[in-house]
């Protein structure tokens, strides 16, 4: 057997659950249970990330744009410190968030913006993401990102609900959207707030078949598909905890209020999986 490659000294990316709150009600959500966030912890978490050697920070949640100016303030700070910044958003609030400050420009804050779109049929997109989801607003956000010149990531959860619509989406991705990368995620039952197991569950064999067809139709677009069993991230929660995705839940590895991110990374039993899962970052 060949030797395993040496792990980096810090996680390839920190996924910061900046808030537990969201403007949508996706019943497949594997993020935090909505609650009253302790805003004072954000500065503590940001300082810990800045002190780490991690090269990239992903703002997620919840919906990071619901926190107002904080996401823009911290993303600018990370960029100035030389870290790559990625915003993962459902896109619904991007236009209004930019409009609040005429001087605000996506290019000053983010290297990559990921927009979540689960179908190009508005009804299917809404069926996946809840009755408040509006495909038109997500598509407007895509236009804003493309016009800015920032790299665009499209994120799509593939479940039993939308599996028959992924081929149609692949055509639009290929012919119209043309993102830097299209991420396809197998539905996972992970997370306490994840309530849609019965209608979303999709076995791996079917997920692979759907995503292979999507790759073929998407043509030259970079497509990165992740099965739920292999998905792994280095997560800092809105409560300052480092979380490990294990089975259908999360285990606590440490707390950035008294543990450094780089030291916790060296204790992370899933570190090789995190490195493998984040290889898509090398494409953008």
Image: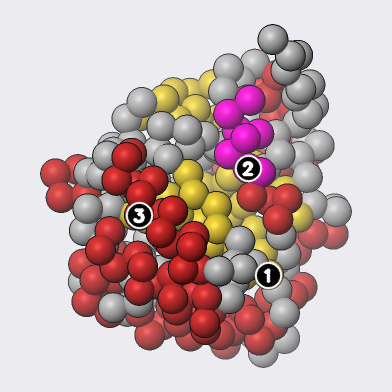
Residue identified by numbered label 1? 151
Residue at image point 49% right, 27% down: 244
Residue at image point 51% right, 56% down: 183
Under circle 2, the secondary element is helix
Q: Residue 273 in magenta?
A: yes
**In the drawing, does residue 263 fall left or right of residue 97?**
right
**In the drawing, does residue 82 fall left or right of residue 211?**
right
- Crowd class of label 3 (few under 14; some 14 to 19; many from 20; radius 10 Å): some
Residue identified by numbered label 3? 210
Q: Quadrant of the C terminus?
A: bottom right
Q: Earlier in the sequence, mark 1 or mark 2?
A: 1
Residue 36 to residue 168: above or below: above
Q: Residue 55 in magenta?
A: no
Residue 171 to residue 222: above or below: below
**In the drawing, does residue 172 fall left or right of residue 52?**
left
Under circle 1, the secondary element is strand
Residue at image point 62% right, 35% down: 276
- The answer to whether the residue labelled 3 contacts the one labelled 1, judged by CB atoms less than 8 Å apart, is no
Q: Image quarter for residue 100? A: bottom right
Q: Image quarter for residue 118? A: bottom left
Q: Earlier in the sequence, mark 3 or mark 1?
A: 1
State the CA–CA distance, disc 2 to disc 3. 22 Å
Position of residue 9 measured from the top left corner of the image (x, y, whole percent) = 79, 27
Q: Which secondary structure type mostly characterizes the magenta part of the structure?
A: helix
State the CA–CA distance, disc 3 to disc 1. 25 Å
What segment is highlighted magenta in the picture?
272-279
Instruction: Determine if residue 260 is in view.
Output: no
Position of residue 64 measured from the top left corner of the image (x, y, whole percent) = 51, 60
Residue identified by numbered label 2? 278
Q: Earlier in the sequence, mark 2 or mark 3?
A: 3
């Amino acid at each position: 057997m060949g030797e395993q490659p040496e792990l980096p000294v810090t996680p390839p990316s920190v996924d910061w659950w900046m808030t537990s709150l969201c403007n949508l009600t996706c019943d497949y959500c594997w993020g935090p249970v909505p609650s009253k966030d302790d805003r004072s912890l954000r500065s503590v978490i940001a300082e810990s990330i800045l002190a780490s050697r991690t090269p990239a920070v992903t703002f997620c949640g919840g919906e990071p744009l619901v926190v107002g100016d904080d996401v823009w303030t911290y993303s600018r700070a990370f960029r100035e410190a030389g870290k790559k910044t990625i915003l993962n958003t459902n896109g619904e609030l991007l236009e209004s968030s930019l409009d609040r400050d005429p001087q605000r420009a996506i290019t000053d804050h983010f290297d990559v913006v990921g927009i979540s779109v689960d179908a190009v049929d508005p009804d299917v997109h809404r069926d996946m993401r809840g009755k408040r989801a509006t495909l038109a607003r997500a598509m407007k956000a895509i236009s804003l990102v493309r016009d800015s010149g920032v790299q665009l990531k499209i994120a799509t959860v593939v479940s039993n609900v939308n599996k028959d619509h992924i081929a149609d989406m692949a055509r639009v991705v290929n012919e119209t959207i043309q993102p830097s990368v299209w991420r396809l995620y197998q539905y996972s039952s992970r997370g306490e707030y994840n309530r849609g197991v019965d209608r979303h569950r999709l076995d791996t064999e079917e997920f692979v078949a759907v995503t292979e067809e999507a790759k073929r139709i998407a043509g030259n677009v970079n497509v990165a598909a992740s099965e739920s069993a292999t998905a792994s991230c280095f997560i800092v929660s809105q409560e300052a905890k480092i979380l490990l995705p294990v089975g259908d839940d999360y285990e606590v590895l440490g707390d950035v209020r008294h543990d450094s991110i780089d030291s916790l990374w060296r204790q992370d039993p899933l570190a090789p999986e995190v490195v493998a899962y984040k290889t898509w970052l090398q494409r953008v």
